[in-house]
Amino acid sequence: MKYIYQIFWLIVAIVFCSCERNSDKSPPNIVIFLADDLGYADVSWNNPNAYTETPNLNNLAESGAVFTDCYSASSMCSPSRAGLLTGRVPARIGVHDWIKEIYKKPYSNIHLPSDEVTFAELLKQKSYQTAVIGKWHLNNEFNSGNQSDPDNQGFDHWFCAPVQANPTHKNPINFYDNGVAVGKIGTDEEPVFSSQVVANKTINWLNSIEKDSPFLLYVPFHEPHVVCDATEEIKQKYLTRIKSGEIPLKKGTGENGLGQAEYYGCIENMDAAIGRILDKLKADGLMKNTLVIFTSDNGPDSNRKYRGRLQSVGETGELRGRKRWILEGGIRQATIMFWNGVIQPQSKIEAPVGHVDFLPTICELANIQIPNKRTIDGVSLAPLFYNQPFSRKENPLHWHFHAPRGGPQSVLRNDNWVIAANWDKKFSAGRFDTLAINKIKNANLVDFKLYDIKKDAGQNTDIKESYPEIFSALKKQLINIHSDVKNDCPDSRQFQWNESLQEIVDTKYKYIKE
């Protein structure tokens, strides 16, 4: 009996300490770093043989938790970002593909609809200071009249490029400061790179905020999206490693592997920018109660040649697929989360989680009601932070993409099982036409496959014949979810052309030919 009482009081003490730990924390600051087209195996916490040096991110991984099975909302940039900000599968939003040139009327009037609710908008309820600095890519032009600029979606301050840094990461010309075009940044004599522009502007913003009020800082970098570039010093370091054979030379990457050096170099340049931002947060005493997340929007690009050399040399390790696939290599992302005193340092979390979980997680941490007028596909990750039971069997991760380069068009992960299917409609992988939305809404699932993702991360062996009961249950679940997503998806009338768009085309793009 004495031992029963001892166990009872031990349990009480553990529960009390857990509750006390939870209650001690006021709503945290939120910092989200988002890479662009980073490979899962491009970083040493996932791949000890990774070529790129990322000391600041490595230190963050040591200080926090590595999430081994964290997934983006899509394998393409625009839909991925839409899902991250809203907690919703992007097909529900109507953002099905990357948002392309606005002048190619009527194909390009896709944007994040104004009635979608982002976590930035929700945090405004708790007087959070909010900023986005980097790449937006939820419309293709700012001031377009679509109410899809960052300030329409809850961000007080924004310094963004609408798409990737142009013409390259070096001396970019397409940033806007709260809606005002900045023009070229940097000179040939004193070049500046997009990651350092983002770091400079982020640090400036941190200097301006109220340090005693919570903040949201969303930093979507352009790196390592092509066209890649970095400082001569960093590039020369990688060229030397390639020349020595330490890094294998890849075919088609240009003289002495220059394309490889540019790719690895821009990742290291991004890491340096992240280091500067983290140092600023530490110097200002802001890391004491700040949740920091690093992840990527999708997997690495493939076979893209610029300036005569291949730069798309990202690594996925054993994962099959890349950007535009919804196989693991396209949707599973290198991810770290850090929260001082809450997330256990040097921990590894293997539970399947996703970017759609960020919104409900932020809502729980900030004590905000999750929007109930629309379907939220994510769940709160807070139990994982506090080492408490976590399950998402009733809310599995799922993806739907009309034009993958290879592999399925709908995928669901439940526990360690992944079920995948194709659609009975064919789609072009070229420029997205808004009329395709109507065909997407009428597609049905065919050609199902089942994988045990823990035993077969490369998704090489379909095992549905070996597990008929599991296959049958998951097939039914995927069909039901896919049907629900289709019904939720707005039709093409959501994205009507308007006078502001036409004025932009008639002025900025009037000399561009199809």
Image (cartoon, rainbow, N blue to C red):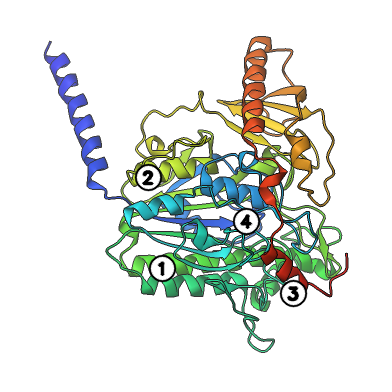
Sequence order check: which comes first, mark 2 or mark 4?
A: 4
Q: Which mark is residue 138?
A: 4
Sequence order check: which comes first, mark 4 or mark 1?
A: 4
For discs 3 and 4, the disc positioned in front in the rendered view: 3
Pointer 3: residues within 10 angstroms few (<14), some, or many (20+)? few
Pointer 4: residues within 10 angstroms few (<14), some, or many (20+)? many
Q: CA distance from mark 2 to mark 4?
A: 31 Å
Going 67% across and 32% down the picture, which residue do you hit?
486
- Most extreme residue toward the bottom, as rendered? 189
Which residue bears the numbered disc 1? 279
Mark 2 in CB contact with mark 3 (< 8 angstroms): no
| Type of the residue with mark 2 | Ile
Q: Which mark is residue 508?
A: 3
For discs 2 and 4, the disc positioned in front in the rendered view: 4
Sequence order check: which comes first, mark 3 or mark 4?
A: 4
Measuring from the top left, give residue 480's x and y in whole percent: 63, 22
Going 66% across and 58% down the picture, which residue do you hit?
51
